[in-house]
Amino acid sequence: MTDRRNTDRRSQAWFGAQGRSGMLYRSWMRNQGFGHEVFDGRPVIGIATSASELAPCNAHLTRVAEAVKRGVWQAGGLPLQFPTMATGETLMRPTAMLYRNLMAMEVEELIRANPLDGVVLLSGCDKTTPAMLMGAASVDLPAVMVTGGPMLNGKFRGQDVGSGTHVWKFEEDLKTGRMTEEECFFAEGCMARSNGHCMTMGTASTMACVAEALGMQLPGSAAWPAVDSRRMETAQAAGRRVVDMVEEELRPSRILTREAFENAIRVNAAIGGSTNAVIHLTALAGRVGVELGPDDFDALVREVPTLVNLKPSGTYLMEDFCYAGGLPAVMAELLGGGLLHGGPITVTGRTVAENTTPAERVGSDVITPLDTPFQPAGTGIAVLRGNLCPDGAVIKQSAASPHLLTHRGPARVFDSPEAYHAVADDPDLDVDENTVVVIRNAGPKGYPGMPEVSNVPLPAKLLKAGITDMVRVCDGRMSGTGYGTVVLHVTPEAAVGGPLALVRDGDPVVLDVPGRTLRLDVDDAELARRREEWTPPAERYVSGYTWLYTQHVEQADRGADFGFLRGGRGHEVPRDSH
C-alpha cells in the first residue's frame, strides 16, 4: 500500500499542530477509539451523509457510508463520517426545494470548517444530490458523489409499477372508479418494496445520472439498485478513489467545466430526464463560474434523440436500465454519434471517452441504438419564450401529448395550487379539453420554494369523460416522475410581477412548442393597463430562514440559488481560535 503520509496536508493544520492546539484536536478525536497513528499525515476523508428516516430515499445511506469507510481505510486514508440535513421531497413541506440552498450552505460550511482533505458525498432524494454538489463545488476540495441507488421495480397485479408515475395514474383510477381505496392502499406497498429513491426516471434518478455524466460519480454507479451488493462495491471503490484524488489534487473545478455541463445536458435529453435538471445544473454552474442559461438546454438537445425507454416517458424502470448497461451504455452511444465531448476529466482521473470505451448496451428495448431511438431527436426539454415568459419556460416534450404541443385555448386562472384543488372535483367546473389551466404564485418567491405542483390532476369531470391530458401553465415545477403537457418554470414568476400575474379567465393562451413560443393573445396596451393595476403580494415572512430565502432567491432561469452563494469561496478557514 502506498504511504499516504504528508505533513503538508490541509488536515495537518489540525492534527499535526504542535502544543496545546494539536493536543486538543487529537485527544478529543481519540475518545472514539482512534490510535495516535491515524494522525500521521494520511489523507482525512469526510463522508457527508444525508441519511435520515424523514427522507425515505436516503434512509439506508448509513450502510452505504460503512462501505465507503472500508475503501478509505484500504487506500490508507482516515474516514470520518458526518451528517448533513436531508431534503426529502416525499415528506417536507411546503417543498424540499425551499431547503436545497440551505443544505448546500450547510455542506459547504461543514467541509470548510473541518480538518478534511477530501469528501465523499452520499445522497439520495431529488434535492440532496444537487445541494451536495453545489456545496462541494464552492469549497473545491477533492470530492466524489455516491448516490444511494433506485428502489427495485414495483410489482402490482403482474405488472411493473413506477414510484411517482403510478401515484398519478392510481389517483386518476380512483377518481374514475377503476380502483377502490383498499386497492390503492395495497398498491402503495407494491410500489415501494425496497430501500432507494424513485425507480422511474424521476429527478432522483435523473440527478444521479447527471452527476455521473458530469464526471462527479464513478462510471455505472448511478443505476445500481440500492439493495444490490454492487451498490456497496461502488461505494467502497469511491472511498478508495477519493484518497487518490487528494494525492492528485483533482478538484471539482477541474471536472465541472463548460464541456462537462454540455455533456450533462445532452445526457439528460437522451435519458428522458427530469425538467428539474435545468434548475439544478444552472445553479451548480453558477458555483463554478460556468455561464449556463435556459437557451443552452434547448440548443444543445435539438440533435439528441431520447434513447432510454423508461417511465414516465416510456415503459421500463431503473432496474431494467441498470441491467441493460446503465448510463455508460447511453454515453457510449452519444459519444459514437459525436454528441458528447470525450475530453473532460472525471473523478476516475480518466476522460469521458476512456470511461465509456468498455461500455456495452444489452438488448435494444430499454436503451435503444442511436440510429433507431426510442424517440427522435428534438423530443427532449424545450425552452419557450414569449410575452407570457420573457425569461423562459420549459416543457418536457417526451412526457407531453403530441396533439397538444401546438394549442390555443382560453385560460382558467387559479391564484394558487390550493385554489385549483378546492374545485378540481366540482362537476360544474367551467373547463373543457381546450381550456388552459393557469396556476400562479408557485414560483421560488411566491410559494415559497417553487414546489412540484404544476402537473395538477385533470378536473374530475374531464377524467370521467375520457380526457387524459390538457395544457397546464405554471411558474412552479413538476416532479420528474410526472407526465402531461405542462409548461413549467414560467419566468419571471407571478409573485415578482411576471406576466403570469396579468392573465385573466378567458384570455387566449397560445402554445407553440415547435416554434418555441408561449404567449398571451392580449394586446400590449391592455397588458400595460393591467400592470398599472397590479400590486405585489404582501410579504408574509419577517424573520427566519424563509425570510432569508424570499429576500435572496433568484429566479428559475438563474437556478433559484441565492445570489450571495454564486461563485466559490475556497477551503481556507477564516480563523483558528485555539
Image: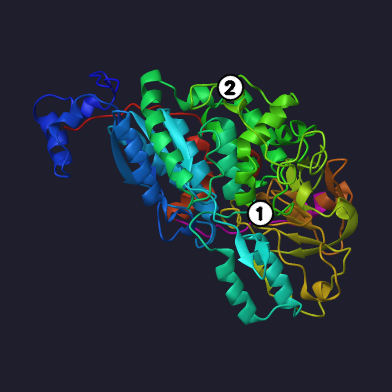
Amino acid type, callout 2: Glu
Q: Residues within 10 Å of mark 2 (few under 14, many from 20)?
A: some
Give the mark nearer the N terminus: 1 vs 2.
2
Say which quarter of the image contains residue 292.
top right
What secondary structure is the magenta-colored segment mainly?
A: loop
Asked if residue 6 lies left or right of residue 528, the reply is: left
Q: Which region is colored magenta? A: 528-542
Question: Residue shown at 38%/35% (left/top)?
Answer: 239
Specify the color scheme. rainbow
> Is residue 106 or residue 256 the one in the foreground?
256
Q: Secondary structure at mark 1?
A: loop
Question: Residue shown at 47%/53% (left/top)?
Answer: 227
Q: Position of residue 49 (x, y in %)?
A: 39, 46
Asked if residue 321 lies left or right of residue 173, the reply is: left
> Is residue 239 or residue 523 the one in the foreground?
239
Q: Which residue is mark 1?
A: 476
- Whether tag 1 and tag 2 are in contact, CB under 8 A, the answer is no
Question: Residue shown at 60%/56% (left/top)?
Answer: 451
Q: Which residue is mark 2?
A: 354
Amino acid type, callout 1: Gly
Q: Position of residue 534 (x, y in %)?
A: 72, 56
Q: Position of residue 218 (x, y in %)?
A: 50, 33
- Up-down: is 543 above or below 251? below
The residue most toward the front is: 363
> Is residue 572 or residue 149 the one in the foreground?
149
Say which quarter of the image contains residue 369.
top right
Q: Which mark is residue 351?
A: none
